[in-house]
Amino acid sequence: MNARSHAIFPRVNHAGWFDTLRVMTAVVAPTVAKGLIIRRPTMERLAERQGVDTNAVKEMQRLKNTYGPAPLLLPIPFRPQLLILDPADVATVLQSSPEPFAAATTEKHAALVHFEPKNVLISSTSRRAELRPAHEHALATADRLHPYAMHFKKIVDAEFLQVLNLPRELDWPAFSQAWFRIVRRVVLGERARNDGTLTETLNELRGRANWAFAAPVDQRKLARFHDQVGRYLREPEKHSLVNRLPRGDELAPENQVAQWLFAFDAAGIAVMRTLALLACHVSYWGKAVEEAMGGDLDRPFTRSCLLEVLRLWPTTPAILRQLTKDIRSGDRVIARGTGIIIFVPFFHRDPALLYANRMEPSIWGQNDALPAAALVPFSAGPVVCPAHNLVPTIASLAVGTFLSAADVVLLQPSLTVDNLPGTLNHFDIQLRLTARRRQK
């Protein structure tokens, strides 16, 4: 027993083999099958049809009722995992990252190495200390509004008002094309607006990343993607995010920027779902429209609606950590290298929450995370997503562009607002847009 082990969890329970198998088949496998790095449309539709996300939450509840709230050690051969079951332990893990709970897990590295092998998320603690400040500066992590927020609003308006100029029904393919033009302009600058090839290359690499260990890295395609990104880094445009990165190769900037391009996909999914949900809630819709018409860059109510969408349908369903040292629990030691799993939907849809399966924007206030309640759409603690202010800002502006210019009707799917489903497949959302007034 390592005398230097640290007492963090007063107690750890040990799952039997049968329950471990149930976790793997009911929770882990469906989450992985849907695509952790890029969503698989067929699996999303199957998950929605079969209610697999709701079943996963129920399985987690069963485990907690069976074993109690202490962390549950799953005896997976060669890769034991500690499953977190209590909100207090979620807060402990996230506040104690990256030491002794490293964000750079073996599983995360196996996936992200396919398109950003030198990214901060899979770097050592010392390297993370060098890289993280660059992300925080570029993304203005500490600022409610990014210094370029007004510029970003102009981009969002320009792209989405073009969509609104066409009388149409809006689906994911049409929305995502406009959304990724916005993403490229925000991250890389105006020259990148029509560079759909860059996005396609990244998506192909993300598709391989879904297979993690099971697929070799396509080094040729990875080099091509980094070269594509590098063209915008060499002469960064004013008011682009890359313009706020330090110059030079010391930070492997292509690897850092790859994460921003990747992560904005989840933000687009959240925008589409927010429009769908607001279309079903008349009172919330009216308040969000009023806020959008007001013109302020900070949209606190719309932001809260977006956070509710991320609570109800987390775009990062599993937060992973890995022990950097032995930790003591009672008379036992949990070994260094053990994985930590925070299955986010379990906490976000806890039936003890009166609002578990309905929309309740009022819970958020000025917060982007409520770690004490394990409501963590952007994680929390020292390793909180560095874009936890930027993403809600841009997403809220995007929602506001639609609300200020059009009435939106949800055509499909049909939602029951008092009992929202465990899965909302964004690929099949369809909205009818009716222009209310024309903007210049």
Image: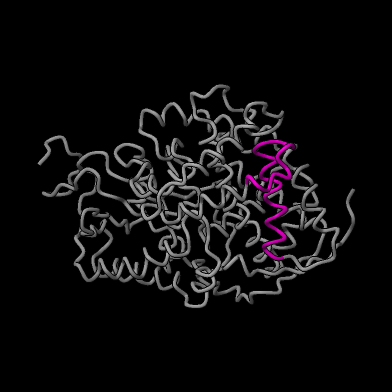
Query: Would residue 403 appear left or right of 427 to someone viewing this image?
Result: right
Which residue is drawn at the image coordinates 58% and 60% (left, top)? 309
- Residue 189 in the magenta stretch? The answer is yes
Identify whether 122 is placed above or below 77: above
Which one is in front, 236 or 379?
236
Q: Which residues are magenta?
A: 171-198
Instruction: Locate residue 49 relative to residue 195 in the image: left or right.
Output: left
Foreground of the two, 312 or 326:
326
Residue 103 relative to residue 277: left or right: left
Classified by dominant secondary structure, the portion drawn in magenta counts as helix
Residue extending farthest front: 220
In reply to whether residue 180 is colored magenta, the answer given is yes
* Whether residue 271 is situated above or below residue 141 in the rendered picture: below
Residue at 20 percent of width and 67 percent of height: 17
Tell me if residue 96 comes above or below residue 163 in the rendering.
above
Q: Position of residue 133 (x, y in %)?
A: 49, 28
Q: Position of residue 62 (x, y in %)?
A: 31, 71
Residue beneath the point at 67% across and 74% down = 412
**Residue 52: quadrant of the picture:** bottom left
Q: How many marks?
A: 0
> Residue 100: percent from the left, percent from the top?
29, 39
Residue occupying the point 33% across, 57% down:
86
Nearer to us in this view, 195 or 287? 195
In the image: residue 340, left or right of residue 167: left
